[in-house]
Image (cartoon, helix red, strand yellow):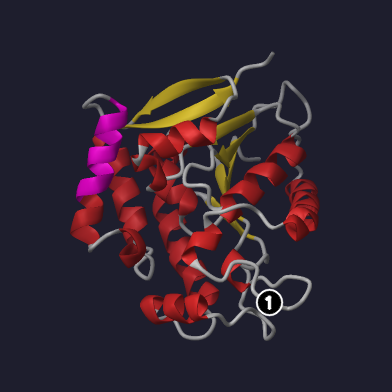
């Protein structure tokens, strides 16, 4: 039974945001499972927008990038020593509306509001998480359960992160939930503040030792197709990840979590 379940919107988010703490938790002898929600294949009727073609060209993974991205994710999470679950929901760039048009046809669109039609998707993800819970025979509804559910805070306002947070909150009933800062969007303090909104949250720093930081960097490097989305190259990624963690920890590398205070 895992001691922690991290819900990752995409095939890299949990590692980018929490790779250091995951490495330390596993090293301490605890089991961790990373569940990636939007890890499904590109279907025959998926959106084929100019934005999708641009992404496919950049990634260089052919017509069904999720297949190779899942392999990258397995390699990254093997580096950290976690259990892996990939759900079959498609990334937002592939999803269509009721009239058959792409729901999110541009980069700006994926950082905007969740389309109203996607409320049903949130329900479907919630059901899938409940079914996964039964499959893993994990008990999360008991307040005494040691299992902690980690959800994206939604820094950056990506629609898939918003959807995973909403589904995760429904599934876990907001009882043992901790929110992680979505990196690299969390490099901007304004994005973190916007994600916190008007809620009452308490921050918790997780200090990282050098071994954990090195494991995080090595795991991120496994996502070779995705590095160019955020970084010039692996060297820049290494520098920026250290700089961010040191900024969070006031010179001591750290990752920051948030817990919502009860009223």
Q: Residue at x 40, y 82 (%)?
A: 57
The 10 Å Cα crowd at callout 1, few under 14, some 14 to 19, many 20 or more, is some
Quarter location, residue 166 = top right
Of the pair 119 and 169, the residue shown nearer to us:
119
Q: Quadrant of the C terminus?
A: top right
The spot of residue 208 in percent (x, y) is 32, 32
Q: Residue at x 65, y 54 (%)?
A: 114
Of the pair 179 and 128, the residue shown nearer to us:
179
The spot of residue 43 in percent (x, y) is 66, 81
- Does any portion of residue 134 appear in the rendered image? yes
**Residue placed under numbered mark 1 in the picture:** 101
Q: Is residue 248 magenta?
A: yes
Quick one: SS at disc 1? loop
Tell whether 151 sits left or right of 74.
right
- Does any portion of residue 29 appear in the rendered image? no
In the figure, 25 relative to 122: above or below? above
Quarter location, residue 91 = bottom right
The span shown in magenta is: 239-249
């Amino acid at each position: 039974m895992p001691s922690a379940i991290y819900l990752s919107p995409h095939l890299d988010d949990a590692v980018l945001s929490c790779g250091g703490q995951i490495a330390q938790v596993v090293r301490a002898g605890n089991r961790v499972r990373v569940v990636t929600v939007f890890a499904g294949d590109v279907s025959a009727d998926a959106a084929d927008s100019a934005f999708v073609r641009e992404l496919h060209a950049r990634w260089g993974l052919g017509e069904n990038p999720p297949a190779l991205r899942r392999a990258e994710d397995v390699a990254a999470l093997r580096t950290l020593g976690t259990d892996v679950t990939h759900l079959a929901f498609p990334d937002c760039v592939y999803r269509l509306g009721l009239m058959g048009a792409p729901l999110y046809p541009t980069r700006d669109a994926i950082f905007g509001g969740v389309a109203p039609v996607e409320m049903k998707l949130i329900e479907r993800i919630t059901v899938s998480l409940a079914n996964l819970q039964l499959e893993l025979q994990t008990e999360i509804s008991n307040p005494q359960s040691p299992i902690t559910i980690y959800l994206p805070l939604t820094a950056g306002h990506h629609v898939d992160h918003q959807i995973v947070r909403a589904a995760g909150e429904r599934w876990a009933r907001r009882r043992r939930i901790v929110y992680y800062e979505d990196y690299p969007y969390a490099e901007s303090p304004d994005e973190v503040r916007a994600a916190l909104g008007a809620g009452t949250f308490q921050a918790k720093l997780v200090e990282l030792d050098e071994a954990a930081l090195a494991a995080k960097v090595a795991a991120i490097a496994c996502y070779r197709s995705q590095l160019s989305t955020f970084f010039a190259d692996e060297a820049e990624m290494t520098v920026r990840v250290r700089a961010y963690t040191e900024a969070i920890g006031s010179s001591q590398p750290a990752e920051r979590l948030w817990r919502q205070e009860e009223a």
